[in-house]
Amino acid sequence: MDVLSGLLINVLEEGFIYGIMAVGVYITYSVLDFPDLSVDGTFPLGMCLTAMLAVAGVNPWLICLLAFVVGAAAGCITGLLHVKLGITDLLSGILVMTGLYSVNLALTGGSSVLPFYNQPTVFNTGVGGLLPAAYNVVIMAAVLCIVVKLLVDLYLKTASGMLLRASGSNARFVISQGKDPGKMKIIGLAIGNGCTALSGSVLAQQTESANVAVGTGMVVMALASVIIGMNLFGRLRFIKPTLAVILGAIVYKACLAIAMQLGLPTNYLKLLMAVIFTLALVSGKIFTGRGKDNDNR
C-alpha cells in the first residue's frame, strides 16, 4: 500500500509540475494554433537559470518570477521571427530552440548538469518548509499549478485575452477591431513559453539540479498532455480547458509510471512517449469524427 501511495504522490508531483507547461502549450497550440517547438529550449532554460541563481543565493520565489520573464522573452523572439521576419512557425521555434541550447550551456558554466543541493527552494522554505516532508512537494506544486491556471483564466477573460483567442481562429476579426493579430501571437507565445520556463524552474527546484538535455521531447509531452486532457475532460462543461490539460498531464504521467512499474526499460521511455502521443492524436480524430457524425444526425 505504501508503494502505491508513493507512486501516486510521485505522479501527482510531476503531473502538477508539467501541468504548468501544459497550460502554456495550450495557449500556443490550442488557442493560437501555433506549433511551437521552442518549448524544447525554454523548459531547460528555466531549469538552467534556476540552477545558476540558486547557487548565487537568490530567493527561490524571485527565481520563479525571473524564469517566467526570461522564458517569455524567448517566446517573444519566436514570435518576432515568425511575425516580423516571415519565418514559418515551425522554423521559428526550431531556431529559438537551437539557439537556447548554447544559452543554457552558458548559464550552467559549460556543464551539461549543474546541481545545487541544500539550497533554498520553494519546497523547503516559507510555506513549503512548514508542510510535512512527505507531501510538501505535491502540495506546493499543486498550488503553483492552480495559481498559474487561475491567472491564465483571468487573462483569457480580458479584452486582450479575447483578441488572443480570435488571433488563432479568426484573424480578420482582430484586424476589424483595429488590432494587430501578429502582436497578439507574440503575446501568446510569450505567455506560453513563460509558463514552460516556470515549469522547468519548479522541476529544477524539486530535483535540486539542472540538465541541459532535459528539454528533448518536452514538446511531445506537453502536446500529448493537452490532447489527452482535451479529449478526456474537455467535453465536460464544468471543466475549463486549462484544468483539462493539467489533468491530461497527470494522466500522461500516470501512463508512464504504470509502464515503468510493469518493467519497461528506461531506454524505451522516449519511444513510449511517442506512442502515447500518437494514440492521443488518433483518439482525438476519432472523437472529432464521432462528434461530427452526431451533429449531422
Image (cartoon, rainbow, N blue to C red):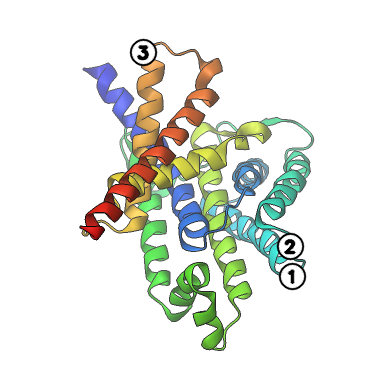
| Residue 195 position within the rendered picture, expressed as x and y whole percent measured from the top left | 52, 54
Local SS, label 3: loop
Characterize the local packing of mark 1: few (<14), some (14-19) or many (20 or more) Cα atoms within 10 angstroms: few
Mark drawn on residue 262? 3
Q: Position of residue 22 (x, y in %)?
A: 45, 48
Of circles 1 and 3, the one toward us is: 1
Q: Specify which label sits upstream in the sequence, 1 or 3.
A: 1
Please name the amino acid that badge 2 sits on. Leu
Spatial distance from mark 2 to mark 1, Cα to Cα? 6 Å
Kindly identify which residue carries mark 1: 84
Residue 216, disc: none
Q: Pointer 2: what residue?
A: 81
Helix, strand or loop status at disc 1? loop
- In which quadrant will I find the C terminus? bottom left
Q: Nearer the viewer, residue 43 or 88?
A: 88
Residue drawn at x 39%, y 35% as measured from the top left: 252
- Tag 1: amino acid: Lys
Q: Residue at x 32, y 53 (%)?
A: 243
> Are the residues tagged 2 and 1 within 8 Å (C-beta)?
yes
Name the quadrant of the N terminus.
top left
Label 3 amino acid?
Answer: Leu
Q: Residue at x 74, y 65 (%)?
A: 86
Q: Are marks 1 and 3 in contact (CB under 8 Å)?
A: no
